[in-house]
């Protein structure tokens, strides 16, 4: 797999570039500017890749179906990230095609530390019909970023998916390929009494199946297991709020556990 990192400015001019086969690194020795974006180009294969858009965030395993575009965040748009991320004038970017041992085995298949709303070819990916006041600290991507601190709300590390009191709120996790799953773990935000909580939530799966999950008022994660099913996506919807006075239930993290299916790992180099 040919890999190429590019940093482009707001006018799509190339500010830096680095190329490699199966692995590529780019050391960028300037401060980022508004409108900058990071592009990871590939030679066309779908497959699993370890990506590091910023050394302060680290490496994450994703499934890509095309070129990946990451918009460098500024101001409010970086409020859900560590203050160290994308800061300063020395940055290390890295990408590597995954090995078989990276993807085989039972793991959290919903984790993507670099998810952004505009991403189309990088999975898993979170999609929603609402985010509280359009704020990044309440964006859907926060629910799959691996951060499970749930005893407060607001800026990192207390980002969450906020539903803005919307009765028909939903969040959809797209995997980009077929996976086999048998467990879902939810960390709901638990800054009581500011927060409310869901007594139950409903899941709809791409295979047409459905599942209800009963919840309790707790800062501890809730878990449900079920017979393994093969899906391309799942959607959490029909959340039933408790009778507590607060109007603010929210989701800190969703973890979906399972394994790869069939020839998915055949793409790995």
Image (cartoon, rainbow, N blue to C red):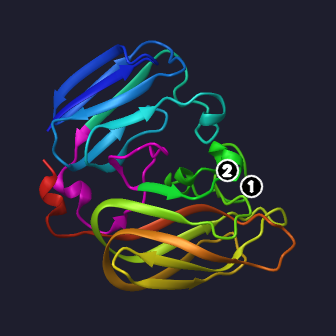
Proximity of marks 2 and 1: CB atoms separated by less than 8 Å? yes
Q: Is residue 50 above or below residue 172?
A: above
Residue at left offset 62%, top offset 66%: 169
Judging by the rendered image, the residue that carries numbered circle 2 is 158
- Name the side, left or right, on which 91 lies relative to 252: left
Residue at left offset 46%, top offset 47%: 113
Res 136 quadrant in image: top right
Res 182 quadrant in image: bottom left
Residue at left offset 48%, top offset 84%: 211
How packed mark 1 is, by other alpha carbons closer than 10 Å (few <14, some 14-19, many 20 or more), is some
- Name the side, left or right, on which 241 lies relative to 224: right
> Mostly what secondary structure, the magenta segment?
loop
**Depth order, front residue of 58/193:** 193
Residue at left offset 21%, top offset 50%: 47
> What secondary structure is found at the residue carrying circle 1?
loop
Q: Is residue 33 above or below residue 153?
A: above
> What secondary structure is found at the residue carrying circle 2?
loop
Q: Earlier in the sequence, mark 2 or mark 1?
A: 1
Q: Is residue 123 magenta?
A: yes
- Give coordinates of residue 38: x percent, y percent: 39, 28
- Give coordinates of residue 56: x percent, y percent: 49, 33
- Name the side, left or right, on which 60 lies relative to 86: left
Marks 2 and 1, how far apart in space? 6 Å
Judging by the rendered image, the residue that carries numbered circle 1 is 152
Quadrant into which the N terminus falls: top left
């Amino acid at each position: 797999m040919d890999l190429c990192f590019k940093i482009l400015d707001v006018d799509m001019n190339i500010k830096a570039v680095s190329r490699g086969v199966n692995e590529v690194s780019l050391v960028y020795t300037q401060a980022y500017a508004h409108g900058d974006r990071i592009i990871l180009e590939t030679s066309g294969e779908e497959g699993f890749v370890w990506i590091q858009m910023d050394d302060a965030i680290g490496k994450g395993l994703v499934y890509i179906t095309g070129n990946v575009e990451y918009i460098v965040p500024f101001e409010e748009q970086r409020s859900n990230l560590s203050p160290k991320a994308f800061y300063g004038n020395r940055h290390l970017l890295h990408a590597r095609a995954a090995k078989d041992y990276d993807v085989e085995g039972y793991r959290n298949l919903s984790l993507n530390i670099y998810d952004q709303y505009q991403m189309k070819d990088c999975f898993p990916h979170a999609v929603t019909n609402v985010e509280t006041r359009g704020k990044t600290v309440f964006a859907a991507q926060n629910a799959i970023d691996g951060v499970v601190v749930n005893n407060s709300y607001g800026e990192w590390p207390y980002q969450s998916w906020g539903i803005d009191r919307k009765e028909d709120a939903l969040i959809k996790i797209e995997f980009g390929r077929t996976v086999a799953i048998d467990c879902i773990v939810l960390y709901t935000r638990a800054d009581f009494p500011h927060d409310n909580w869901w007594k139950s939530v409903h899941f709809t799966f791409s295979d047409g199946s459905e599942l209800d999950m009963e919840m309790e008022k707790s800062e501890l994660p809730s878990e449900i297991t079920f017979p393994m099913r093969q899906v391309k996506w799942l959607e959490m919807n029909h959340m039933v709020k408790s009778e507590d006075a607060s109007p603010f239930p929210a989701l800190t993290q969703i973890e979906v556990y399972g394994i790869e299916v069939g020839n998915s790992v055949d793409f790995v180099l």
